[in-house]
Amino acid sequence: MFSNLAMAYVFIYVCLGLIAAGIILLFQMKIKHNAEQKEMERLKKKYHDYFVYVQTHLHGDITPELPPGKLTPAERRVIQAKFMEWIEQFKGDAREKLLRLCRDAGFVEADIRALSSLRKDRRIEAAYRLGGMRAEEAVPQLQHMMNRMKYGPMTIIIARAIAKSAVQSQQIREMLSKLLSYDKAIHHMAADILLETRLDSASLMRKLLDDPDPGLVKVSLVAMWGQAIPAVVPALGKLVGSEEKDVRAEAVKLYLSSNPALKDDTIEELMNDHAWEVRSAAAKALGRLHAAGSIPLLASALKDDNWYVRNHSAESLAMLGEQGFETLCQAALTGTGPARETALYRIERIMAKEGEHEQVEQMVAYNKRKLVYDRYFGVQPNKRIGTVAGVGGDYTA
């Protein structure tokens, strides 16, 4: 019994010792971190005039030089961090001058050596900085590292570094292929990484859209959202008929967002596609394109099994003037099930906007719809709106 009690005391003392050691270690780390932060702030103030000098000559004919003397490791980190911050902000000659300064200072060479470090944190930091400095000479080694590792946060850091540093489209393709080989739902992240490249975006998008790998095609399509690239619009027409459902859906959305002149047979084909994503995108675009000839197809789509297709069809009908609104009213009266509910919901949304129209054209369009509404559903009694009496009495009666 006493031996067990003694062992319990020993265990408690050991635990207390470990806790105390942990607390002391945390305090030491905190003190070291604070000291490093203070040193960084001191060095930023020390090199403030140098940073002003560099920034002043970034856009001129004079090429800025490195500060005189040998730099300490802390000074190198401060200057490198400032250069990388400006590299992200500037383009053209200003960026090239900063990249040249990074190479002349040996920042790129040092980080390439750090990629072979046994410490994982040093390798991650080096990859991040090499991407920030657009170190094209580091791309082969970064690709080798990426090919040897499992998927994780470091993979994304290296992929982004390759995208920023690559000078050949094949390097971008190999990076994206490796990224997609992990079988993760990261097409949007891959598209975001793709947009970090300094290569010509139009040329790169055209190559990826023609790639036999559907994953790369989808990444390119996602990356095109928000990017005005007229040169790749013709390639979208080919992808509208792709056998891959995801590729076809994204291609249709982008193709319709470019406001094309659609033929009747093309509209009918899209509205009858077996993928609901394609039908939904087509239904949503027809109202914006003012395709009045598609009203019968939209009316039929109110009976679609998919909620998005029905609601986008009703929304487009509401945008197609009196004829489109009258079609909604007919569906609300004679339709059944989801079609009737969808039409009624859209009609209620439209009629609830009374008094919200400021422009004359909007008021006229609303009044025309109201006449159609009254013809189908009967004249609704006007609600008396009470107001505060002003000078001269109450004129609301």
Image (cartoon, rainbow, N blue to C red):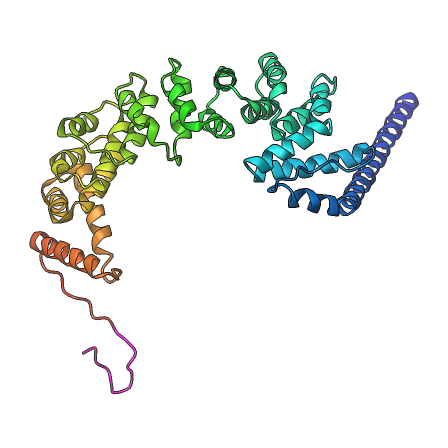
Extreme residue toward the front, this view? 61
- Residue closest to the eye, 389 or 30: 30
Residue located 40% across and 19% down the image: 207
Image quarter hosting the C terminus = bottom left
The location of residue 168, given as percent across then percent down, is 51, 19
Does residue 394 belong to the magenta stretch?
yes
Q: Which residues are magenta?
A: 386-397
Tell me which residue sits at (18%, 27%) in the image.
266
Nearest the viewer among 332 and 95 is 95
- Magenta span: chief secondary structure: loop
Q: Name the quarter where the N terminus is drawn.
A: top right
Image coordinates for residue 353, horizontal then vertical, percent: 24, 57
The stretch drawn in magenta includes residue 274: no
Residue 186, position in %: x, y?
47, 25
Q: Is 388 left, or right, of 342 in this rendering?
A: right
Near-viewer residue (70 or 81): 70
Res 155 → quadrant: top right
Q: Is residue 306 visible?
A: no
Q: Is residue 370 visible?
A: yes
Q: Image check: 278 left or right of 55?
A: left
Q: On the rendered structure, is 265 left or right of 63? A: left
Spot occupied by residue 253 in the image (x, y as percentages of width and height): 30, 31
Q: Is residue 260 left or right of residue 124?
A: left
Q: 364 or 355: which is nearer to us?
A: 364
